Image (tube, rainbow, N blue to C red):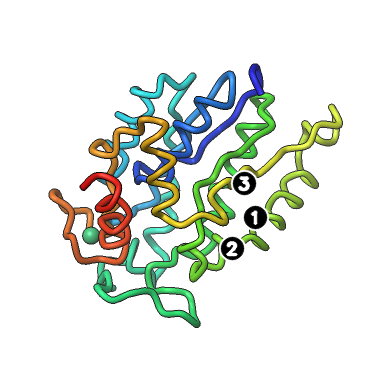
């Protein structure tokens, strides 16, 4: 892909870090985009900053979305809702879902793409994320269609913006295996929903992470 440019959504967790390293391998210029949306685990932003620095991105942009603080009901942004310790429910979106999060993130990434002339938006959603509606393949397809329908680049330059989600069919373990190959510094990533240091070790994302890394870095 050589000279092409990409923006990667970077939370500071292991999936988005792996995506950033993959983007650095496959694209000429890479930007990282992180969000402060009032998440309980805003500490992840410090990790994102360090990862972006290590990956030598063109620029690490941090966008504030304070409105999420005033929305009730998500364990990630509402102080009154506890982070669950059990696995995700199979049939309904987990309490850790943040409404429209990825739609907002991709819309903002697309705004940067339009202004910077970037045609690839990378997002690290994967197979274990499917309980979240905005992490499913049908969402990615629909978001890409909406972005192209509203893009200046698309309208003016006849360019297509691609929502790049290479981990859609991959498990967390597959991602960790790829990351090992790419030399992702997993010790510099942060995944816990509680936002504590050290991580709680009990929330679903802590456990998924631990399971994925255990076999690969025994
Ligand atoms: Zn945790």
SS label for mark 1: helix
Q: Residue at x 30, y 33 (%)?
A: 185
Q: CA distance from mark 3 to mark 2?
A: 16 Å
Q: CA distance from mark 3 to mark 1?
A: 12 Å
Location of mark 3 (residue): 107
The reply, left or right, for residue 3 in relation to residue 97 is right
Location of mark 1 (residue): 140
The reply, left or right, for residue 27 in relation to residue 81 is right
Q: Is mark 1 within 8 Å of ligand 1?
A: no
Tag of residue 185:
none
Q: Residue at x 77, y 31 (%)?
A: 153
**In the picture, which quadrant includes the N terminus?**
top right
The reply, left or right, for residue 90 in relation to residue 46 is right
Mark 3 in CB contact with mark 1 (< 8 angstroms): no
Mark 2 in CB contact with mark 1 (< 8 angstroms): yes
SS label for mark 2: loop
Q: Position of residue 50 (x, y in %)?
A: 30, 29
Q: Residue at x 59, y 19 (%)?
A: 28
Q: Position of residue 133 (x, y in %)?
A: 55, 68
Tag of residue 136:
2
SS label for mark 3: helix
Q: Position of residue 85 (x, y in %)?
A: 24, 73
Mark before the other along the chain sequence, 3 or 1: 3
């Amino acid at each position: 892909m050589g000279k092409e440019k990409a923006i990667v959504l970077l939370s500071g967790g292991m999936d988005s870090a792996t995506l950033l390293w993959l983007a650095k391998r496959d694209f000429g210029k890479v930007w990282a985009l992180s969000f402060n949306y009032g998440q309980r685990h805003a500490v992840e932003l410090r990790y994102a900053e360090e990862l972006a620095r290590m990956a030598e991105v063109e620029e690490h942009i941090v966008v504030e979305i304070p409105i999420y603080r005033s929305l009730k009901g998500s364990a990630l942004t509402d102080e009154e809702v506890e982070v669950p310790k059990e696995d995700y429910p199979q049939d309904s979106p987990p309490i850790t879902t943040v409404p429209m999060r990825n739609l907002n993130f991709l819309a903002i990434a697309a705004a940067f793409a339009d202004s910077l002339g970037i045609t690839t938006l990378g997002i690290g959603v994967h197979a274990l994320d499917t309980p979240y509606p905005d992490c499913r393949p049908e969402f990615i397809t629909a978001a890409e269609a909406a972005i192209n329908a509203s893009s200046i680049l698309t309208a003016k330059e006849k360019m297509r913006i691609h929502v790049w989600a290479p981990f859609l069919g991959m498990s967390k373990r597959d991602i960790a295996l790829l990351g090992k190959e790419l030399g992702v510094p997993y010790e510099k990533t942060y995944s816990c929903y509680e936002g504590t240091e050290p991580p709680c070790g009990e929330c679903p994302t802590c456990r998924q992470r631990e399971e994925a890394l255990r076999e690969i870095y025994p």
